[in-house]
Amino acid sequence: MQQTRTITDKIFLVLKGLAMGAANKVPGVSGGVVAFVAGFYEEFIYSLQKVNLKAFKLLISGRFKSLFQYVNGKFLGLLILGMLISYFSVSKLLDYLIVHYELYVWSSFFGMIIGSIYYISKDFEEWSKRSLAFVILGIVLGTAISFLEPAKENDNLWFVFFCGIISVSGMTLPGFSGSFILILLGNYVLLLVDSVNTLYDTIADMLSLDFNFTSERIELLKILVVFTLGSLAGMVSLSHLLGYVLKRYKKDTFAIIIGFITGSLGVVWPWKEKIFKRDPAGNALLDSRGDKIIDNYDRYLPDFGNTQTWIAIFFILVGIAIVLALAWYEKKNSET
């Protein structure tokens, strides 16, 4: 799957990693959809699949150049670089936009998912009863997941490790939002808000030569390390499973992915109100930043007499256009 990449290809690969990282941060949006639409999903899965026993033997024998080539290191490295940059830049911008322009952000993502569904489904030359059955199965599962009740926060390290395995599903399973699953497991704020912000603050303090860390900060950093290890374990194990499935049941896999993505539309439905977690006295609970902790959403139909509704519809169309433009560019680029 390795290719000779130009400077432009490398820059675009980092940007794709940025997009994947940003998508994984938003509940209901899957980074795997980005990989699917941008045309590198299969290379991504098969590259991760190379992280196996042979790769480990190359590592311990010190054959680093062979290891780099074997695991398609240039591709994975640039993609992961983009994701890391996203974690401390684009995802921060998304946090700001969701707070101040929530309806329009969700509308854009809603449009992107619609565009993704169209882009992926148009490649099916004919729809068999089997393919339709897998699409329906995917829709049912995706919809059912979107309406589950969230659990309570749990900082047990074994559970955090399990959350890491689940969270990475958004990168390897298009339509399966790892962030939203973390909300259902009750650990979204702990793992993707509090822990990440703690790491960010710790790096800033270390650069200013301040090493006086509280026990609470050390505990959150420990949780982040365990979560990261779980994510790596999940990424490798799921890629092996998906690599096997893609080789033998590619059309069925794509059909159920289309269903998952369609089912996820309920999660990113733009017109909704937050339902906050509350204590027994009815007071909203706050995270470490002083923000109210979201428990779930109450969805409603749009009011077409409202100007904001039409602006939101415009952003839905913009989202669709962005995905189709990227898909067109990727197709044109692959043909040259």
Image (cartoon, rainbow, N blue to C red):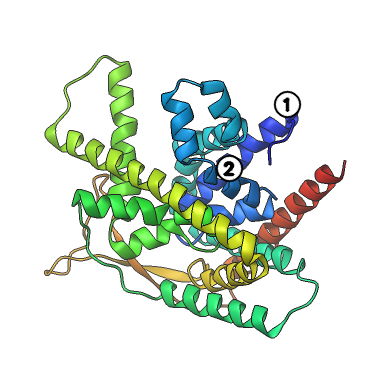
What residue is at 44 percent from the left and 33 percent from the top? 56
For residue 6, side relative to residue 209 (left or right): right
Q: Nearer the viewer, mark 2 or mark 1?
A: 2
For residue 251, side relative to residue 144 (left or right): right
Label 1 SS: helix
Q: Quadrant of residue 253?
A: bottom right
* Residue corresponding to mark 1: 7
Label 2 SS: helix
Label placed on residue 47: 2
In this rendered view, identify the residue nearer to me: 62 or 236: 62
Kind of residue sitting beneath label 1: Ile
Q: Quadrant of the C terminus?
A: top right
Q: Earlier in the sequence, mark 2 or mark 1?
A: 1
> Which residue is farthest bottom?
129
Counting from the top left corner in percent of width and height, residue 140 is at 50, 80
In this rendered view, identify the residue nearer to me: 310 or 197: 197
